[in-house]
């Protein structure tokens, strides 16, 4: 951004909120805190780039946003942006409302797509699918090593915690009574959903030696083992791009899926 500014694409401000919490429909948790790296990243940017931004007259806006508390978000966003935009509180609150609606629309679309896959499984139109337990940043193909594409090439539809249909038990208190992290809650709930469904396999994906994912490894493994659900644990794919090793591990997972009668759905051409 600084390089683009210096090249003539002028910036007035950089908005990088401290997102301390995340929205989730999973219940039975102590809190729904975000990853501390996500929450603290704006402080790192301020420490690293404050002088460079100030020298160029660029404002760094880094309000604390606890997105689970809408009233607090409305105050924080107005205080951060009104001096720059001149927006009244009513206009600012309307923008916040539009943001929450956009989040709800995205979640609804993801759930709609995932529900269609699960409905196909239940109706016998699809033989199996794979649930990948992941964090939102794994959407980046550089972080996930295009895992979704590799699985689809093998013939399985890919589901994520956010795309699974919100039905059945959403409370995870019995799985992790002291869960405070939104991502951990979603992963545990998704693992239980998959373990209770006869046509789903599970891949447990974690990056950066994430400390919040470590306590989940054993419960996820136990959930899958208790029902014979095929499970692959991929926690060490960060340092290099091991395409050959990843494909070999996925072939092993594919063999386990087929051994349990969960082969891919044949492609039917019109």
Image: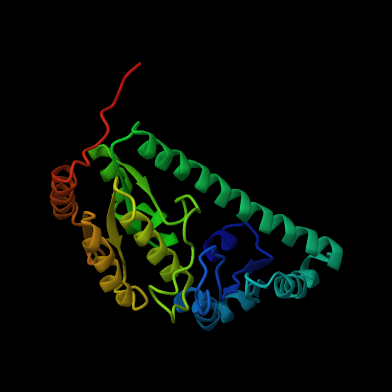
264 with respect to 73 (left or right): left
The answer to which of 77 and 164 lies nearer the viewer is: 164
- Where is residue 95? Give x, y as percent: 75, 59
121 with respect to 30 (left or right): left
- Give the residue displayed 86% in from the left and 63% down from the top: 90
- Where is residue 6? Give x, y as percent: 57, 63
The answer to which of 179 and 239 lies nearer the viewer is: 179
- Where is residue 42? Give x, y as percent: 54, 76
Quadrant location, the C terminus: top left
Q: Is residue 266 above or below residue 117?
A: above
The answer to which of 264 and 2 lies nearer the viewer is: 264
Q: Quadrant of residue 183?
A: bottom left
Q: In this figure, what is the number of numbered marks?
A: 0
Quadrant location, the N terminus: bottom right
Q: Quadrant of residue 100?
A: bottom right
- Colour basis: rainbow
The answer to which of 181 and 59 lies nearer the viewer is: 181
One can see residue 263 in this view? yes
- Give the residue displayed 83% in from the left and 64% down from the top: 87
Q: Quadrant of residue 119?
A: top left
- Give the residue displayed 25% in from the left and 28% down from the top: 266
- Give the residue displayed 65% in from the left and 60% down from the top: 10
One can see residue 146 in this view? no
């Amino acid at each position: 951004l600084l390089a683009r500014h210096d090249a003539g694409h002028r910036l007035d401000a950089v908005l990088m909120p401290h997102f301390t919490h995340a929205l989730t429909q999973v219940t039975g948790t102590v809190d729904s805190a975000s990853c501390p790296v996500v929450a603290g990243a704006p402080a790192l940017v301020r420490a690293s780039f404050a002088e460079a931004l100030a020298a160029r007259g660029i404002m760094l806006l880094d309000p604390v946003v606890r997105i689970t508390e809408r009233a607090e978000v409305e105050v924080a966003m107005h205080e951060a942006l009104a001096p720059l935009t001149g927006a009244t509180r009513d206009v600012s609150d309307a923008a916040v409302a539009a943001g929450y609606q956009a989040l709800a629309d995205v979640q609804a679309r993801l759930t709609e797509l995932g529900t269609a896959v699960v409905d196909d499984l239940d109706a016998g139109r699809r033989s199996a699918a794979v649930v990948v337990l992941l964090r939102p940043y794994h959407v980046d193909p550089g972080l996930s090593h295009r895992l979704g594409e590799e699985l689809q090439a093998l013939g399985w539809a890919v589901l994520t915690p956010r795309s699974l249909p919100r039905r059945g038990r959403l409370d995870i208190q019995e799985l992790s009574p002291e869960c405070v992290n939104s991502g951990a809650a979603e992963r545990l709930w998704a693992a239980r959903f998959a373990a209770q469904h006869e046509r789903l396999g599970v891949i447990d994906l974690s990056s950066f030696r994430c400390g919040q994912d470590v306590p989940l490894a054993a419960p996820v493994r136990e959930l899958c083992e208790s029902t014979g659900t095929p499970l692959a644990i991929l926690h060490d794919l960060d340092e290099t791009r091991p395409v050959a090793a990843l494909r070999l591990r996925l072939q092993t997972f594919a063999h386990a899926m087929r051994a349990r009668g969960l082969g891919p759905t044949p492609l039917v051409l019109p």
